[in-house]
Image (cartoon, rainbow, N blue to C red):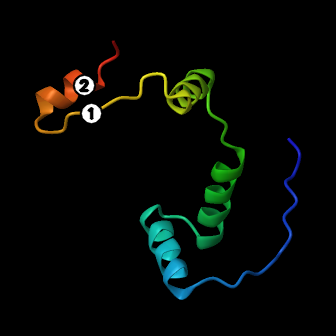
Amino acid sequence: MEAVVRKQTSFRLREDLLQILQEHAKKANRSLNNFVESTLMDAMYSEPNEETVAAINEARSGKYAGVIDTTDFGSFKTTTEKA
């Protein structure tokens, strides 16, 4: 297994963002550095599978676009089911 080379760097972050990151890292029992690195890795290297890509393309096509009735759950369900 090859060693991963890491380069020390620094960022300037908003204080509120840093606090949120620190809280999430603590909840996950991880260091701030590890939490931020893995979050960035997930964001940069996650690719949707074929089924998700197909669903995205279908939604963007507008093929099933229409009026959705939100007056109650039954009506909502009926209007969101495929024809």
Residue designated by label 2: 79
Residue 7 placement, left or right of 19? right
Amino acid tagged 2: Thr
Return the mark for residue 4: none
Q: Is 9 above or below relative to 36?
A: below
Provide the secondary structure element on which disc 2 rests: helix
Whole-percent x and y of residue 3? Answer: 87, 52
Point out residue 14 in the picture as x, y percentages from the top left corner.
58, 85
Q: Depth check: 71 or 11 in front?
A: 71
Residue at 64% x, 49% y is: 42
What whole-number distance in Å separates the C-alpha atoms at marks 2 and 1?
5 Å
Instruction: Tell me if mark 2 has few (under 14), some (14-19) or many (20+) residues whose alpha carbon lies within 10 angstroms of its own.
Output: some
Looking at the rendered structure, the kind of residue marked 1 is Ile
Residue found at x 34% / y 16%: 82
Give the farthest residue toward the front.
67
With 60 as the anchor, is 69 left or right in this view? left
Q: Quadrant of the C terminus?
A: top left
Residue at screen point 58% across, 22% down: 54
Please state the horizontal and vertical placement of residue 13, each as a whole percent of the image. 63, 82
- Which quadrant would the N terminus be assigned to in this image? top right
Q: In terms of sequence position, does the residue under pointer 2 or pointer 1 come before the other? A: 1
Q: Are marks 2 and 1 in contact (CB under 8 Å)?
A: yes
Q: Which residue is mark 1?
A: 68
Q: Residue 55, relative to residue 34: is it above or below?
A: above
Q: Quadrant of residue 27?
A: bottom left
How packed mark 1 is, by other alpha carbons closer than 10 Å (few <14, some 14-19, many 20 or more), is few
Residue 15 vs residue 33, the one in the foreground: 15
View extreme (top): residue:
83
**58 and 42: which one is in front?**
58
The image shows residue 43 at horizontal and vertical percentages of: 64, 52
At x 25%, y 25%, the residue is 79
